[in-house]
Amino acid sequence: MFSNKTIVGALVGVAAIGSPAFAQDFNGVTVNVLTRPGYVIAGPLIERGKDFEEMTGAKIVVTEVPFAEIFPKIQNDWATGTNSIDVGVFAAGWGVELDAAGLLEDLDPYVAADDKIDLDDIAPYFREFGQKVGGKTKLLMVDGDFQMVYYRTDVLEEAGLEPPKTWEDYLDVASKIHGMDMNGDGEPDYGSCIFKKRNAQSYFAIQTFAAPIVQTSGTAQGFHFDNATMKPLINNDGWKKAFELYKETGKYGPPEELNMDIGDTRALFKAGRCGLIVEWGDPGTLQLDDDATAIRGKMLAISAIGSREVLDRETGKLVPVTKENAPYSVDGINYSPFAAFGGWAGAINKGADERTKAAAYAFLSHMNQSAQSGVDVTRGPTGYNPYRISQLASIDPWVEAGMPADLATNYLGAINAALDNLNMSSDMKIPGAQQYTGVVLDTELARYLADEISVEEALANIEEGWEEITEDFGRDEQVAAQALALGG
Amino acid sequence: MATNENIRQPEFSRAGVPFGERLSEWVDRHSGTFFIAPAVVLILIFAIFPTIYSIFFAVSRVRFTGDGLTFRYVGFRNFSKQFFGSSEVHFLGRTDPVSIFGWVVFAIIVIAVLWWLIRSVKRSTWVGMIGRTISAVMAIFLSWILCASLLSGNAIGTLYQTLFYVVVGCALQFAIGTGLAFLCSQPISGKNFFRVVFFIPLMITPLGVGYAMRMVADVTKGPFQPFLSYMGLENWVWSTDAWSARFVMMTGDSWQWIPFIFICMLAALENIPRDHVEAAQVDGASSFQIFREIIWPQVLPVAVTVLLIRMIEAFKIVDLPNIMTGGGPGSSTESMTLHSMYIWRANDLGSSAAIAYLLLILTVVVCASFFNYVVLGQVRKARA
């Protein structure tokens, strides 16, 4: 009798051998993948899925659903035993809730038999935070994510301004360049562009604003909760300031910014209409696109924007940055680059049959291996950002892909600086993460931005909403999950 | 006894009739039940059962686990937080502070409702009084929220956003739809062409309408951009202002649903006997008098029924605000259905079910009140 583990090991062993060797091994197997809509993220899965089918016989079917429906659809499908989805490609941080429900396949046995995955080449943060849950590999990255600020070098030079270091600087620069013609079409353009539409991804940007104000003593400290009690750390002057700064950027943004999703702001900055933007790693490569000639090589990244004031957690008030209260601060400024979203990663449904799981792993490994991912991350439309050390070590592949050398140096430098920052802030990685941020934080933020409620009301509502979620999942369980997530 | 036996139906006392014949007669007698049974069973399975099952969701916190769904009973917490908890302002709107104007209007409404209720005591049965009391309680509750939020200068929540789409939207749609139907019932050239044109929007899927409206209403690239620019409104953005966003939403909804009112009212108008109208014309009545005295009373039962159906549908508005604004700015265009959908999408099935039940209660009470006190009233009036 062979145990399931033996069968899996055998299948994985076959799958892990070079591509020609596993030709036909997965004949008749169909792997159903669910992810976000559009070419971004889904496109490369489809394209490489065809290659994979030719090599192995396994058919890769990619289903695309709106961003907000990805997680509930997967959770619903896997928890109810429908099992129409074999692989979910979603935010790395969401995996923990699925794993807590026992829905994720443990990938360690597959990884152990895979000599091509080379996990040591994956940057430690993405390897340990993104791919692992409870110390076991449960996901494989296809993308690495940090939110950064990008600025137009030509516009700031023309205005005689320095790139911003703090959020106050950001507002100052935005106010001074707002209304300038930045693309030569005779029309006034915008100082700052941020995607602020509700039910989209605005809730990540506000965390990028809050992180350097609230988190001061390292990644394990976190900036959402008091880790010991899981009491929300949001109804205080730190988050209040972040909300106010975030709202004020709207004065220097497009008039319809509150209804703009990330695709809308990307169209604007590619058309040369934005002086400053808050974004993930994508603008680095997107400016190489054919429709981005107005900004090619002109948008440089800033690893993190900081704050001269930080939250005193005892009093809930803001205090000036010192080396005592913010040991990682530099020149009186506290920085905390935010790993927003944590990167897109693939997870396998534990309820799928063994052969499908083996084929699914082989496909995710194929996507993750440096031979494929090293190419994908240099192409802007894929939406994939670098997450392997080899991708971040040299500018050569980037220059070969068409990126100007100085832009490549800046771009990789910014991502490396974020990864190396000991005060880097993590996205939530506890059960209910999507509810905490994607629903409660997002809704109250949107209502504050629309002047429906005051900042005090928004923060009080978020505090109450987060407490309800914590109670639902169990406070002790959440304390344990938070400790595991932040390594505290 | 003999008398009793004599009044029995013949088929019950036909001893000696073969079993097959008796069975056939029994089946004949119950044929109505047999014919209707499949439909009733289907309704029970597909409508009633899920409705009852969802009560378990509404009083529970539901978690997804490897073994399926787990329910934890939380009583009415999913409901109470819509009125007193973290979702209060989202659902009801801001109800503090209440202006003097708000207090005055609320007092007037309460007095009027109580007066109506007291007057009903003499005329209604006890069953009728229960219904009227429920209607009165709902009227007072809705009045309080209206007076404390909108009439006091505070923001409204998803409750009144839904009622805005229902009351203002349906009134507008009814007025325009009836007007167009009246025009198309007149002997004008090309009326068949207009009938088809006016009916087309109803055949488009709401998602399509949403995306079309989003493009039409785009202030930077849409077809009205030159006009807005000419008017000096190039910087005006409807989607960032609560009320303009609601009106754009209502306009899109009206564009789709005016044809429904139009087609129903056209059918009603064309069924009015021509001799009544011609007789009035011979008597020298003006067009307005003919409409008011002849046409309107005859189409009134149809009109209020159509309005009722449209209201029930309007309570469920979800596609347009979801596509055009995602419920924003803030939650300004979010209907109760959309609110429920967003929470459901986050897998908070308990709260989603609770909001769905609140919507059900609101819809049933408002529409039943409208039916009892308006529709039936107009039908009785028309018959008289």
Image: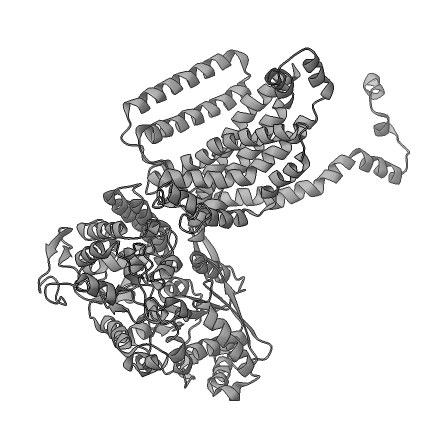
> Is residue B162 depicted above or below A230 in this figure?
above
Residue B45 % position (x, y): 62, 45
Rendered view: A74 above or below B131: below
Query: Depth check: A352 or B284 in front?
Result: B284
Judging depth in this view, the residue of B76 and B232 nearest the camera is: B232
How many marks do you count on the picture? 0
For this view, does B189 lie left or right of residue A11? right
Residue B29 showing in the rendered view:
yes
Which quarter of the figure has residue A156? bottom left
Left or right of A456 in this view: B190? right
Q: How is the image coloured?
A: one colour
Residue drawn at point x = 65 percent, y = 44 percent: B42
Q: Quadrant of the C terminus of chain A?
A: bottom left
Residue B58 position, x and y percent, is 45, 44
User: Is residue A227 in view from this perspective?
Assistant: no
Horizontal arrangement in the rendering, residue A400 relative to residue B344 (left or right):
left
Q: Residue at x 47, y 43 (%)?
A: B337
Residue nearest the viewer, comparing B332 with A218: B332
Is A85 on the left-hand or right-hand side of A137?
A: right
The x, y position of residue A314, in whole percent, is 13, 53
Return the x and y of residue B253 as percentages of the image width and height. 51, 40
Q: Quadrant of the N terminus of chain A?
A: bottom right
Residue at screen point 74% across, 36% down: B33
**Height in image: A285 above or below A21?**
above
